Image (cartoon, grey):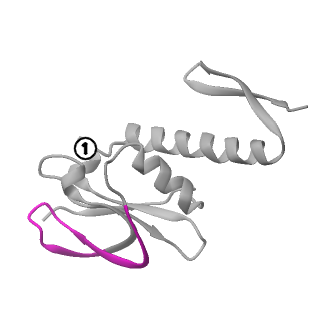
């Protein structure tokens, strides 16, 4: 049985988190009440999450991937050790976090009447330039 790790994130906006997961996986489940996660054999685990990517959508011998809403309003990632080394790596989580942040910023900037002028990668960091719309 694979061990699961709980990883604190800064994900607060459910819609944006789901949007970013759907960009990576064909199916993402969203539940009002936390649901059970399953291991690669299909056995239930004690871990539960409100946002779930089932193992069949991740990779061979994967476990379910979950995001559980914590008391501070963030969603912690629940990832098996196997998947942390094969599919949902630190790089994967970093890219998910960057894409999530970029989407949150884009939505906020649009609501304040700014539009994206350019997007560049400089020294491994994304640089976004916005301009107020007239």
Residues in magenta? 29-47
Residue 124, position as x, y percentages in the image:
54, 23
Is 40 a magenta residue? yes
Residue 123, position as x, y percentages in the image:
58, 19
Q: Residue furthest front?
A: 134
Q: Residue furthest right?
A: 134
Residue drawn where x is 19% and y is 46% of the image: 59
Q: Quadrant of the C terminus?
A: top right
Residue drawn where x is 52% and y is 56% of the image: 9
Residue beneath disc 1: 85
Q: Nearer the viewer, residue 90 or 132?
A: 132
Total count of labels: 1
Q: Could you tell whether 86 is left or right of 127 in the image?
A: left
Q: Quadrant of the N terminus?
A: bottom left
Residue drawn where x is 24% and y is 51% of the image: 57
Q: Residue furthest left?
A: 41
Q: Could you tell whether 43 is left or right of 132 in the image?
A: left
Is 101 rendered above or below residue 38?
Answer: above
Q: Could you tell whether 83 is left or right of 22 in the image?
A: left
State whether the magenta stretch is mostly helix, strand or loop.
Answer: strand
How many neighbours does mark 1 have within 10 angstroms: few (below 14), some (14-19), or many (20 or more)?
few
Residue 81, position as x, y percentages in the image:
24, 54
Is 109 a magenta residue? no
Q: Nearer the viewer, residue 95 or 22?
A: 22
Mark 1 falls on what kind of element?
helix
Is 70 rendered above or below residue 17?
Answer: below
Residue drawn where x is 37% and y is 43% of the image: 24
Residue 90, position as x, y percentages in the image:
38, 42
Is 98 rendered above or below residue 117?
Answer: below
């Amino acid at each position: 049985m694979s061990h699961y790790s709980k990883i604190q994130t800064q994900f607060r906006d459910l819609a944006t988190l789901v949007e970013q997961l759907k960009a990576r996986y064909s199916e993402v489940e969203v539940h009002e009440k936390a649901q059970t996660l399953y291991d690669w054999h299909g056995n239930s685990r004690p871990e539960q999450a409100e946002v779930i990517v089932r193992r069949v959508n991740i990779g061979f011998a994967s476990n379910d991937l979950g995001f559980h809403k914590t008391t501070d309003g963030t969603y912690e990632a629940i990832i098996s050790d196997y998947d942390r080394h094969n599919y949902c790596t630190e790089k994967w989580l970093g890219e998910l976090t960057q894409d999530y942040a970029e989407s949150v910023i884009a939505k906020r900037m649009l609501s304040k009447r700014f539009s994206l002028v350019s997007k560049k990668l400089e020294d491994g960091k994304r640089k976004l330039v916005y301009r107020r719309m007239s």
